[in-house]
């Protein structure tokens, strides 16, 4: 049997293209240039109102936040738990199924960035500040105080449970959430020629309404999610830098004034970085960041319990896989203790990752042009997850080993103190603590300047180069929101960050579900999928006819249907 294709087609213009054929589509220009007064105006006014409330009546905002968190956990905590695991299954299904070979670009387009560069850029996205803050504190907290239902403190499996719980929060789940947005944006922009907006990805289910009131509402929620997610990271960074100053500079206990001052400095730094441009700002900072982070991890690996850390890697992965069903199914139905624990850990994390999806999703979409869906999902899920495993096994392993051998890392104060308490035990403690503070600052600046640009992009109809005034506004707003969130927490500033993050992320959960549905509908109409269906039907009919009329001796040719 042979296939004759004597008449190759010319690629038609987009208006005439058959749905089974690929077309050279350039991204659509925005219908209007400049600031979207509705999207920016509404989000800016609500943000200013929130800030005014927070600074004028911090107590009433704290009370309202506590009530809001109680309602969210009591009525929608299950939604965070269920959707986060569903997104993991969803993106793996996309990669392994019939959509896996669809490229995020034209059919014959090569990846824009080399694989090594692509991996390096993903390393700096999405979690830098969190890895610094929680690298020691989460494993050691779960080791000393095991999650509900996992045994008493000091049980034989406490270390494995602590590491498995940490892996659950930092590996597949968060990056699957990011991947949903990244795939939707990259597919829409590079294969469909749409605007670089979250709302544009809803065209398959909203049609023209994706550019109307409904679409504007989606972009507004994306801005709010990014604003509060970035503010949470800035707040964590401020807490950790304050702790470092207390230890290194010996300044003793400090109040909220110092926290606000640190936030002001970091905010000024990332606003300057954002308006300086990507080449001068983000790339330069990311390169410094990468070197310092790797150097710090190698230092702790060498001077710390190296063999214990190496043993912890396979143990952590195995425990994570074994405990995954139980951890993914844990909800407030198990009692008040579990509900409180979830709001401080699992649900807080899922809300935090959801709030970062517009920024991280759009970032990984930007660097993934030309990758197939299978390549995209494999890289986005596995590479950062492996980095997280190694990071937590080094820093968490060091802390757990010290705790086992009599050094009370868990009792060293708040979560922000525990990394510095671990480093104090090893040589060059002052130098390594200074490196941590520099890393925390740079990690946030390199992420938050990009987040402020994303908020500017969403405010200005998808432009890749939002105006400086818009970027500066969102940068300053992020710093101010972080200050309010810390003040709301009072003596326990971390609680304020966690409470408001969970509440602010709730609307975006619903948007993410819709985004997944829109992506599936989009992919179902992709030229590759349509071609495959045409091919199956045509070849099956041709083979039946050929065998019926000619036995094994027949040829399949392509020609115009005379009846068409």
Image (cartoon, helix red, strand yellow):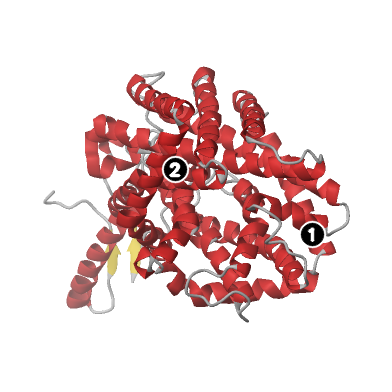
The residue carrying mark 1 is: 300
Q: Which residue is mark 2?
A: 500
Viewer-closest of 118 and 146: 146
Decide which of 529, 20 is in the foreground and name it. Answer: 529
Badge 1 element:
helix
Q: Is 530 positioned to the left or the right of 73 in the image?
A: left
Q: Which mark is residue 415?
A: none
Of circles 2 and 1, the one toward us is 2
Q: On screen, 478 above or below 86?
A: above
Q: Residue at x 69, y 40 (%)?
A: 242
Specify whether residue 164 is in view: yes
Q: Which of the two residues, 229 or 243, is positioned nearer the viewer here?
A: 243
**Residue occupying image coordinates x 61% and y 26%:** 277
Q: Residue furthest left?
A: 563
Task: Provide residue 362's location: percent of width, then percent of height.
Answer: 48, 41
| Residue 377 locus on image (x, y percent) | 48, 57
- Indicate the position of residue 287 as horizontal and vertical percent values: 71, 41
> Please, is residue 539 above or below residue 259 in the view?
below
| Image mark count | 2
Position of residue 123 in the picture relative to residue 351 (left or right): right
| Residue 555 drawn at (x, y percent) | 29, 67
Answer yes or no: is residue 104 visible: no
Name the outermost residue toward the bottom.
156
Residue depicted at 40% across the width and 38% down the height? 222
* Rendering quarter of residue 285: top right
Q: CA distance from mark 2 to mark 1?
A: 34 Å
Of callouts 2 and 1, the N-terminal one: 1
């Amino acid at each position: 049997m042979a296939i004759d294709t004597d008449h190759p087609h010319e690629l038609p213009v987009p208006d005439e293209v058959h749905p089974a054929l690929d077309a050279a589509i350039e991204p659509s220009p925005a219908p209007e240039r400049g600031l979207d007064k509705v999207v920016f105006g509404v989000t800016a006014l609500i943000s200013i109102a929130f800030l005014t409330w927070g600074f004028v009546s911090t107590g009433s905002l704290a009370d309202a936040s506590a009530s809001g968190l109680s309602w969210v956990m009591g009525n929608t905590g299950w939604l965070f738990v269920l959707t986060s695991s569903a997104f993991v299954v969803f993106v793996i299904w996309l990669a392994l199924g019939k959509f896996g070979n669809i490229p995020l670009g034209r059919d014959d387009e090569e990846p824009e960035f080399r694989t090594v560069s692509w991996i390096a850029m993903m390393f700096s996205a999405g979690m830098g500040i969190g890895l610094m803050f929680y690298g020691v504190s989460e494993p050691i907290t779960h080791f000393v105080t095991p999650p509900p239902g996992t045994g008493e403190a000091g049980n034989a499996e406490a270390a494995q449970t602590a590491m498995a719980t940490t892996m659950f929060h930092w590996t597949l789940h968060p990056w699957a959430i990011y991947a949903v947005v990244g795939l939707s944006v990259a597919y829409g922009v590079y294969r469909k020629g749409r605007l670089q907006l979250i709302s544009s990805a809803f065209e398959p289910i909203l049609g023209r309404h994706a550019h109307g009131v409904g679409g504007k509402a989606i972009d507004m929620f994306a801005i709010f999610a990014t604003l509060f997610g970035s503010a949470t990271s800035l707040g964590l960074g401020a807490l950790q830098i304050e702790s470092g100053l207390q230890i290194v500079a010996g300044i003793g206990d400090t109040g909220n004034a110092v926290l606000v001052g640190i936030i002001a400095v970091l905010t000024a730094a990332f606003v300057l970085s954002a308006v300086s441009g990507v080449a001068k700002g983000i790339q330069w900072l990311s390169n410094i960041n990468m070197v310092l982070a790797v150097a710090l991890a190698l230092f702790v690996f060498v001077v710390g319990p190296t063999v214990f850390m190496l043993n912890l890697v396979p143990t952590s992965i195995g425990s994570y896989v074994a405990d995954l069903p139980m951890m993914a199914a844990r909800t407030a139905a198990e009692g008040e203790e579990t509900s409180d624990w979830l709001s401080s850990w699992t649900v807080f994390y899922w809300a935090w990752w959801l709030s970062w999806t517009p920024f991280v999703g759009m970032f990984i979409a930007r660097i993934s042009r030309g990758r197939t869906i299978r390549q995209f999902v494999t890289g986005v899920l596995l590479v950062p997850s492996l980095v997280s495993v190694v990071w937590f096994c080094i820093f968490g392993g060091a802390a757990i080993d010290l705790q086992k051998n009599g050094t009370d890392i868990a009792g060293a104060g708040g979560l922000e103190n525990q990394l510095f308490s671990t480093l104090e035990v090893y040589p060059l403690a002052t130098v390594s603590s200074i490196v941590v503070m520099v890393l925390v600052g740079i990690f946030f600046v390199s992420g938050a300047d990009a987040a402020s640009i994303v908020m500017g992009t969403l405010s200005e109809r998808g432009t890749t180069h939002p105006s400086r005034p818009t970027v500066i506004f969102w940068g300053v707003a992020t710093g101010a929101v972080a200050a309010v969130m810390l003040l709301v927490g009072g003596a326990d500033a971390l609680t304020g960050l966690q409470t408001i993050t969970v509440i602010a992320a709730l609307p975006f959960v619903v948007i993410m579900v819709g985004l997944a549905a829109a992506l599936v509908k989009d992919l179902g109409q992709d030229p590759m999928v349509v071609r495959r269906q045409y091919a199956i039907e045509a070849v099956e009919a041709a083979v039946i006819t050929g065998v019926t009329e000619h036995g094994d001796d027949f040829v399949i040719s392509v020609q115009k249907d005379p009846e068409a």
